[in-house]
Image (cartoon, rainbow, N blue to C red):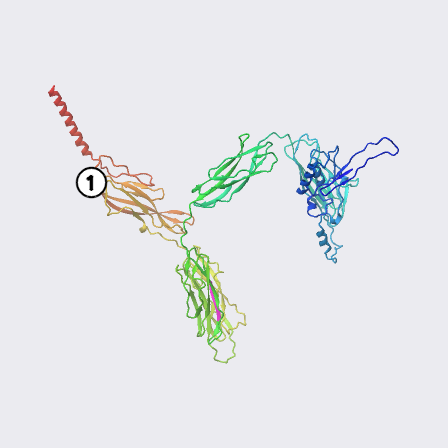
Amino acid sequence: MRVFPRIFGERDATAAFYRPGKEKRMKSYTIHLIRHGICEGNLEGRYIGRTQSPLAQEGIQALLELKRKGIYPEAKKYYASPCVRCVDTLKVLYPTADPEVILELAECDFGDWENKKAEDHENNEQTDPGETSDPAAEKIYKLTADPTELPFDDLTAGYEKVETTSTVTIKNEGTEAVTLVQPESEFFDIAPVSEVESSGNIQLAQGGEQTFTVQPKLGLSAKDDPYVEELVFASDESTEASATVTASVMVKTETPKTVTATVKPEGPLKFGTLEQGYETAPDAQPVTVENTGTEAIRIQLSAPEDYEVGEPSAEVLNPGDKAATFTVQPKTGLQVGDHSDTISVTDQNTGNTLAEVRLEFTVSEPEPEPEPNPGLSVTDSLEFGTKEEGYKELPDAKKVTVTNTGNTKIVLKQPSSNAYTIGTLSATELEAGDNATFSVQPVSGLSQGEYLEDIVIANDANVEAYVNVHFSVTKKKTDNSKKANNLTGIKKPSDIKDLPNGTQKTQKALKLPGTVKITTTKGEQKASVKWDVKGSSYDPSSAERQIFNVKGTVILPEGVKNPNKISTVIAVSITVNGYQGTEAAASDNKITGIDSNGKYDTNTKITFTASGAGMDNTNPRKGDTRYQPKSWKITETRTWDGEPYTATFRVSKPGKYTLKATFGQQKYDGSSWKDTGTQSESTVTFTVSQAAVLTATPSPAVTQTNQKSAVQTGDSTPIMTFVIILIVAVVCIGGILVYRRKKK
């Protein structure tokens, strides 16, 4: 008997068997014991017994290297343990062998150490020993299967053996021991790896597991759909404790020879859109070609004009080979337009197109520079509280942040104030998105009064930007009265109505007062209000009429108490009118290109343009109106189909003419322009004189851009000239004839 190594070394042993007392030597056998290659569990440092761990790639390579050196001999009969790593080792070393799987050769279980690392055991030992299970806890019956699906390789009808054997492990994850009942199957052979009772039942303790081998039965006939069966491993103790494994296998008729391939991704390769003049092309994208047929293919790719196509990673693909990969990338410098195309994947052997790859890439016109749209956002308000007249300690300075919310550079000017000390701007030139800060602090020595002020941040873009600040100075106490100054009421400000549509969402624009009147036990006083403008529902961009409330918190002056807990929250109702629409004036409709004082003759081609009022409104709002040119007339009416609203004509007969253009009113309904039925006319009267040089050539027909028909006015053909020429010709011919007769 000889024992062969895994990769670490070897041990040798031989044995010959004799019958004592006999001269004739008995028949002997040589048994070779081969240990499985390194599995993935070995590399991970796990204790692997009954756990099904496949061979690691390193183990496969080591076995192949030892096989190349001729270490492993051929044999007449092959046996294998049911462990996957053992069966796979035999397949690597002896691909044509038909091993007999012996269940009794299965390795023993490591118990608590099974499929665990040393560090896992160390962590378990650190568990709090005071933790004990509750004996009164509910009994749990739970079985799990790993894996839950067993898809087998396709079989061909008439097969005499099944090469593939799969395993499934059933584990008791409940709290109680169970009696596992092995399922019976119509299409699959199921056998436990370890020896079981004659009854076929298996006892599983808590945490215990049992591994089964599963393989399709012999003699299954071919059909169009796979054999699918649910294998239910149940428990005698509880109907709820079961684990289901779905096994499936396809039995096909003999596969005919096919030459097919697929590409991934199946959908188009989308490279997006870039502006003309782009210097960097979109990233290259990979395409894989997979041989889905039964025959080898030789890959040939078409070459789209606007794309760079890389060489495939493999020119020839045999059935079962890994997919070949190539890359595709648009070229640089492509012109404006749609550059969609297709790559054909062809088999050079047959000349057949196997697959196609759709390519999509667009080059767009460069975006025009955006219209300057300056904008600034500023800290809403600053509240500095109340001080008594003659105060020496100033309120703390507060910071104001100014942010450029537009798309163009803005230059700020240093703010100023008489009642407040304004710090220097941290920056005066703000690019889009930049911000600047400055500090604000009341000055010393202010007399009694309310110092409510809008500190304006002036700028070269003339954008309205300000911050509302408030500081209150009360009269210095001169009496020694100990009468409490308690709040007794707050006078609600009047509602604010009829603000114009589009009013800015600021305290100042919404006309919210900076102070309100309050009553106290010592009389009437003013108190500042901090309005929550941002928290209101008002939308400045809405064209609809809006009625909303703005809440404010009254800031009680120094010395005023509120023992009765009167609410200091007030609200003001504000009404902002709806957008009424911009009414285009019919008087603004114009005809350009033709002048009543212009000099025109019968050889002049006259071109004019009709311009409707409001046609330059590129961002209309619901309710806006405009006038669209519809038709024009000199002697006959001609219409326009659309822009440009231009026409060209020539008048061949001198005289005085009137050009009349008709405009139709349209109103924007929120999504499109609609005709209202209202029309307006504009006219221009002009004079055409006879051209100085006459020609016998008939005047060309009138031309007109974008109109349904053309018109020609008058006829300047010189008929009398032709009449005179004809008379002279007749006289000459008659004279010639008379002369010839006299001569005869």
Instruction: Give the vertical position of 549 relative to 39 (above or below).
Output: below
Callout 1, which amino acid? Answer: Ala
Question: What range of the chain is rendered magenta?
Answer: 379-385
Residue under the image location 52 percent in, 42 percent down: 285
Q: Does the magenta stretch include residue 83?
A: no
Label 1 residue SS: loop
Residue 590 visible, this angle: yes
Instruction: State which quarter of the image contains the N terminus.
Output: top right
Decide which of 676, 235 is in the foreground and name it. Answer: 235
Which residue was labeled with disc 1? 692
Q: Residue 402 placed where, x, y %?
A: 45, 61
Q: Where is residue 309 in the image (x, y as percent from the top left)?
A: 51, 39
Neighbor class of circle 1 (other Cα within 10 Å; few <14, some 14-19, many 20+) is: few
**Residue 236 in view, yes or no:** no
Q: Quadrant of residue 686?
A: top left
User: Which residue is the extreme one toward the left?
Assistant: 742
Return the residue nearer the eye: 550 or 595. Answer: 595
Instruction: Please tell me whether the stretch drawn in magenta is mainly helix, strand or loop.
Output: strand
Q: Which of 167 and 542 is in front in this view?
A: 167
